[in-house]
Amino acid sequence: MAVNKKVRTFISQSSWIRKMFEEGNRMRKQYGGPNIFDFSIGNPNVEPPPEFKKALQQVVSDDSAGVHGYMPNAGFFETRESVAALLSETYGVPLGPDNVIMTCGAAGALNVICKVLLEPGDEVLIPTPCFMEYRFYADNANGTAIFVKTCGDFSLDLSAMGHAISERTKIVLINSPNNPTGKVYDEASIQGLSEILEIKSRTYGREIYLVSDEPYRDVVYDGINVPSIFRYYKNSIIASSYSKSLSLAGERIGYLAVNPALSDIDEVIGGLVFYNRTLGFVNAPALMQRVIAKIQGVTVNVEAYARKRKLLCDGLASIGYKFFRPDGTFYLFPKSPIDDDIEFVHALQKRRILTVPGSGFGWPGHFRIAFCVDDATIVNSMKGFEEAFREGY
Amino acid sequence: MAVNKKVRTFISQSSWIRKMFEEGNRMRKQYGGPNIFDFSIGNPNVEPPPEFKKALQQVVSDDSAGVHGYMPNAGFFETRESVAALLSETYGVPLGPDNVIMTCGAAGALNVICKVLLEPGDEVLIPTPCFMEYRFYADNANGTAIFVKTCGDFSLDLSAMGHAISERTKIVLINSPNNPTGKVYDEASIQGLSEILEIKSRTYGREIYLVSDEPYRDVVYDGINVPSIFRYYKNSIIASSYSKSLSLAGERIGYLAVNPALSDIDEVIGGLVFYNRTLGFVNAPALMQRVIAKIQGVTVNVEAYARKRKLLCDGLASIGYKFFRPDGTFYLFPKSPIDDDIEFVHALQKRRILTVPGSGFGWPGHFRIAFCVDDATIVNSMKGFEEAFREGY
């Protein structure tokens, strides 16, 4: 056997999202781009804002010596200072440059966090539906992902989470605004979860860490507020990126931020920097670190996503689809009109509509529509969505 | 305990190179930059070539939709095609885009390779002296690094390597041109090693993979040729980056290339792409992928390093230092004039000369000088090198 035993299983269970994305690439070649309604992957289609382009030009024009070379593994001091300043405002807790480590996106940040905190066999508790790649991040650190269902409206089921926490739980990982549901966990949920984690940490005599994956924090609608975990729970770490807020998903630029009140913070930060280096990231890409330092607080045009959300929600509602209207993200997670979400996704695919079955998010019976696409794709897909809905009943 | 048990030990044994680099930063603040002779880290000081700057400008000016977004996890097709074309020439074996995966530097490539190939407890055999971070890459994949000494002239000790191979050996990892010695393993060594690996693979009834870490391939002197492992051993993979050949160490752009003759190649490539995604790299940074696609075969001005090598070698030889004159890289690895290399490095540090003890490369009794510095730093450090040498005797 050439590859390790796990890889085979993992690949066979692997990302439905990527499978559908690659299916889309195949179908585009076959049918031509405009005839494919590809809602498979969360690849932002709203372009980076003008401020980004200006900052990129500035950074590229500066050819001082060593700008493309190594810097401290945590990232450029100026970048971390700039990120920390905005985060202090956003999270209502004073953060310094030493609380921030620049990473290769949020996926890089989460791998580093798991690697530092988990002992072999430790558990990472994750509410579903969720981005299922989390389980591989836990496994990379020899931990195990434990999934706990959310309530019917996709809010945190605190009672279920409390019951699922054991002496092996080391991390509780939330993602808000949530992929795939678009749910933002509200202030009361975060407060309630924090209280549970404090009690359970005392009960088991070891810290449980709250990690929040927040790349969609800036992509929210109707003025909704994403609560700050730092204000409620001291042993907390945030993982985030500019993949969605600035539409830079391919550039792998993100960060992790550590609550200044975290227990043994120096040891944890030393460990995070160590694994940022030795997992092979070494540091976040230098050029993008210098760009984002200049444009903290700038985001893509979220109104464009709001418009797409309205187009999609209004269209699908009028057909009869049932769904939770997302608070944020560019995902909609409707109920499948038939029980078998995979079958329904295939029914859509016959109409050249690519979506991802809820089974790919630990939540069968639903499917995900990534609406980070042209308005025309949404409008022109409605006929197919309607046909599949009628046939599906 | 906040962090996992291993991290503490690892950090305490951790990179001498980074320790000295950070010491250098501290001393620069205290004494001023020009008064510090910092030979600690392999951070290229020869600037990226004009072709790079031109390509970067071109890429930045192209603001087509989606250029900063996700692409297939293996990287842009055009980039892999361009890289594969040059590699086919370099290695004398025809490679296609599917044999290449773009990675976050060679460190990213090596982590991905270890993660795919190693079962828990598998061994990675590595000749010393070497870059000691390899042991963390092996550990990240639950493998173990086994070190085997090279000969007196730093050439491969094939007999010792043959004896060290066991039924647990899965990877033999070489680095040529070598950090820290500058040695290029010659054709006969590579051929001999390949024969041993074929025999041992048969003996133990499982494949042993030859992995070559080659970021210094283009930084060689006196027209020396770096042999192609692809021509001698089918189960071979190359990890490399543009960190040194284009002075882009902070940009995290590299690749891995798989021998087209590798056993079960589709499975291995599928696994490599899977772990490139799920270790959190997702893909190599998009912008730099587009840049390097345009400038395959371009390198920094290696003559500048050749000049520095001559300055340093001539200066140290006239003092009385003993060393192997490097075939490539920008490292010199002289014998410490006293047995205790750490003590000698401290003696140099008193003269504000920062080097790295051989103990940091599994080879006490020597020390490493990274000569990727201004010519003036080399010239002005000679007084200190001489004083320490006299005192050291």
Image (cartoon, coloured by chain):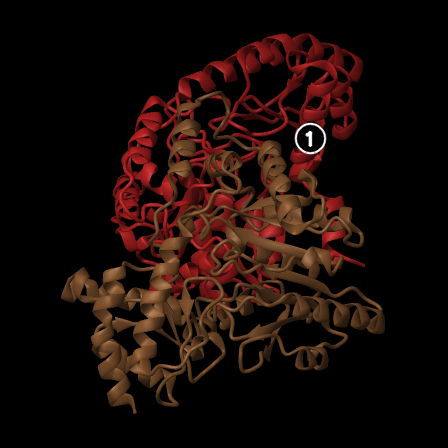
Chain colours: A brown, B red
**The C terminus of chain B lies in which quarter of the figure?**
top right
- In the drawing, does residue A156 fall left or right of residue A6? right
Above/below status of B35 relative to B171? above
In front here: B274 or B231? Answer: B274
Q: Residue furthest left?
A: A31
Q: Is residue B264 visible?
A: no
**The N terminus of chain B lies in which quarter of the figure?**
bottom right
Q: Quadrant of residue A331?
A: bottom left
- In the drawing, does residue B102 fall left or right of residue A362? left
> Which chain contains the residue that carries disc 1?
B
Q: Is residue A136 visible?
A: yes
Position in image of residue B169 (x %, y %): 55, 60
Identity of the residue drawn at 37% across and 88% down: A340
Q: Residue furthest front?
A: A222
In front here: A205 or B249? Answer: A205
In front here: B79 or A220? Answer: A220
Position in image of residue A215 (x %, y %): 51, 55
Position in image of residue B294 (x %, y %): 28, 35
**Number of marks in picture:** 1
Above/below status of A248 relative to A179? above
Q: Quadrant of residue A170?
A: bottom right
- In the drawing, does residue B326 fall left or right of residue A19? right
Q: Which residue is mark 1?
A: B22
The amino acid on which the numbered mark 1 sits, given as a three-letter code, is Glu
Above/below status of B109 relative to B353? below
Helix, strand or loop for disc 1? helix
Position in image of residue B56 (x %, y %): 34, 31
Identity of the residue drawn at 40% across and 24% down: A61
- In the drawing, does residue B344 fall left or right of residue A6? right
